[in-house]
Image: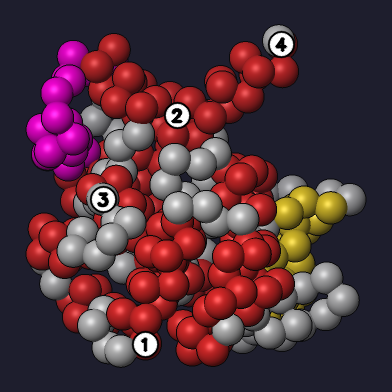
Amino acid sequence: MDLEGINLDHTLSCGQAFRWRKLEGRWHGIVAGKEIVLEQMGDDAEVHTSLSDRAVRDYFRYDDDNGEIFAEIGRDRYITMLLRRYRGLRLLRQDPWECSASYILATYANVPRIIQMVERVSRTFGTKLSEDGFSFPSPEQILKKSAQAGTCGLGYRCERFVEFARSVHDGKVDFDSLKCADYSDCVKELARFDGIGSKVADCVALFSLDHLEAFPIDVRIGRVLEQRYGIKGSYRKTNAWARQHFGCYAGYAQEYIYFDQDIKNRSINNRR
């Protein structure tokens, strides 16, 4: 199958998910426990995987009406410019367990470090799919060998990672209910768990639970809100403003802003 109108480099390198790597011009990843290889072909992408077409399109959110979404969030010149510059960037719909567990590992770590930790966890606990491919482990797989978590280089995140796996295994986390809940109730419930603060809760809500109004704010996003919109203050204040300004699809605006800032940051680092 093919994916229409997608830019793989934009979509898979913008910090949403941590199981993708580019080798010899093709993107290799693992989705729903299956290996997948994507190759850019003009404005479209060629897909190689045993996943069903429906599963692939669901992961890349092809049920979203991008025309409606971009019309809604394109409320100022800056966002309109980003939508043109990074055409083909799509949000992903990730598995809620994998997404939330991965973002618990993401606290106070850069993307390369997060990718490294997620890969070690997958190799230690997950199912081997090929010579170099391992699925992200289920909570059950982690709990069966929890003593080995200390070998994954997770640091202080280790205990909270294992405890979150236990909470999911014991039914204390109901991802289906979180999808159906109001945005505010969803992030409030997620924040009950150790390792999930306001930003991580927003990331999980946006990238796996269909709450497209979620607007995760890190230092760089906060700087943009202050410099371009004159908005600063607490996470709660800036987050509320962004969701009101960009509307029910604010998460899309956030990801375009994040990717733009990430590109600029890479360019600065490459010049040093």
107 left or right of 197? right
Out of 228 and 72, give the one closest to the viewer: 228
Residue drawn 44% across and 72% down? 162
Disc on res. 169: 1
Magenta segment, which residues? 228-246
Lower position in the chain sequence, tag 2 or tag 1:
2
Q: Residue at x 48, y 71 (%)?
A: 98
Relative depth, front residue between 80 and 186: 186
- Tell me which numbered mark, 3 or 1, is placed earlier along the sequence: 1
- Name the residue located 23 percent from the left edge and 48 percent from the top edge: 198
Question: Is disc 1 surrounded by few (<14), some (14 to 19) or many (20+) residues within 10 Å?
Answer: some
Secondary structure at numbered mark 3: loop
Q: Residue beneath label 3, please?
A: 197
Q: Position of residue 77 (x, y in %)?
A: 32, 20
Q: Which SS class for mark 2?
A: helix
| Alpha carbon separation for disc pair 3 and 2 | 28 Å
Determine which residue is flagged by label 2. Answer: 82
Is label 1 in a helix, a strand or a loop? helix
Q: In whole angstroms, how far apart are the C-alphas of marks 4 and 2?
A: 23 Å
Cβ–Cβ under 8 Å for marks 3 and 1 = no
Tag shown at residue 271: 4
The kind of residue tagged 4 is: Arg
Q: CA distance from mark 4 to mark 3?
A: 34 Å
